[in-house]
Image (spheres, rainbow, N blue to C red):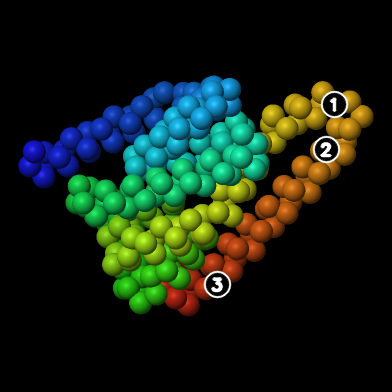
Amino acid sequence: MKTPVRIAAVAGVIALVAIAAYLLPLARWTISLAEWARSAGWIGVALFVVVYVLSTVAALPGSILTLAAGFAYGPVWGLAVASPASVAGATCAFALGRTFLRRWAANLVAKSPRAQALDAAVAREDFKLVLLLRLSPLFPFNVLNYALSLSTVRPSRYVIASAIGMLPGTALYVYLGSLAPAAADLANTGGTSRLGLVAYGVGLMATIAVAIVATRAARRALATALPDSAA
């Protein structure tokens, strides 16, 4: 199959997924998926990861699925599922952006002046810049995957820096997702519910504090590392 045909085929699939995301009740379906995954063991985990990767490649927001991971598996196991899934999705998008979807990725990035200014900065300090960009909400997660695929960053550095940089934000969303079933469970435990709610509240505040500190530090570092057009 010739390259233009491949690009057209992949673009068609992504377009169908995007239309479905707009027209269909994905939030309700995501909750249903989380409830099913919680009772399906490893099969549920595998399916959840596949859905997460496909959503990331299609440039759909991953926040709902990250919340669903916390809803389905709790704060600890939810992070153990969501973090590798987000890294796998980001890596697949990066690989496609360098191969079959390079032209499509270039058109996507062309809409963002900030993303266009990344290449020169990443060429100087690729690991540091990828890490800081993942920590900071300066660029949307799914746009950044394709923007970095057009840069000169080495795949190994991209994967490692992304895994570390995305961890605080992923942990926050997973923890938020875990609060709904945790509150329901605590409400059924009688006298111990108040202590449990306090523990969850303290954990939530600590997670938010870590995310805020990491984000602010990344923003300050990016202000000096990136060109003015991006920072």
Tag of residue 220: 3
Badge 2 element? helix
Q: The C terminus is located in which quarter?
A: bottom left
Residue receiving disc 2: 196
Give how far across and how far down residue 216 sits, in percent.
60, 65
Q: How far apart are marks 3 and 2 (CA)?
A: 37 Å
The correct choice, above or below, for 17 with respect to 155 in the image is above
| Tag nearer the camera, 3 or 2 | 2
Is label 1 in contact with label 2 (beta carbons under 8 Å)? Answer: yes
Q: Which amino acid does label 1 sit on?
A: Thr
Pick whichever of labels 3 and 2 is earlier in the sequence.
2
What secondary structure is marked by label 1? loop
Q: Residue shown at 56%/34% (left/top)?
A: 68
The picture quadrant where one finds residue 78 is top right
Residue 228 falls left or right of residue 99: right
Q: Position of residue 171 (x, y in %)?
A: 60, 48
Instruction: Give the foreground label among 1 and 3.
Output: 1
Q: Residue at 69% of width from left, 31% of height from top?
A: 180
- Is 170 placed left or right of 210 in the picture? left
C-alpha gap between disc 1 and disc 3: 45 Å
- Pick the front one: 109 or 119: 119
Near mark 2 (Cα within 10 A), the count class, few <14, some 14-19 or many ≥20, is some
**Which residue in the rendered view is the most extreme toward the right?**
191
Task: Specify the amino acid type for callout 3.
Answer: Arg
Disc marking residue 180: none
Is residue 216 left or right of 44 when viewed as pictured?
A: right
Residue farthest to the front?
Answer: 42
Res 189 label = 1
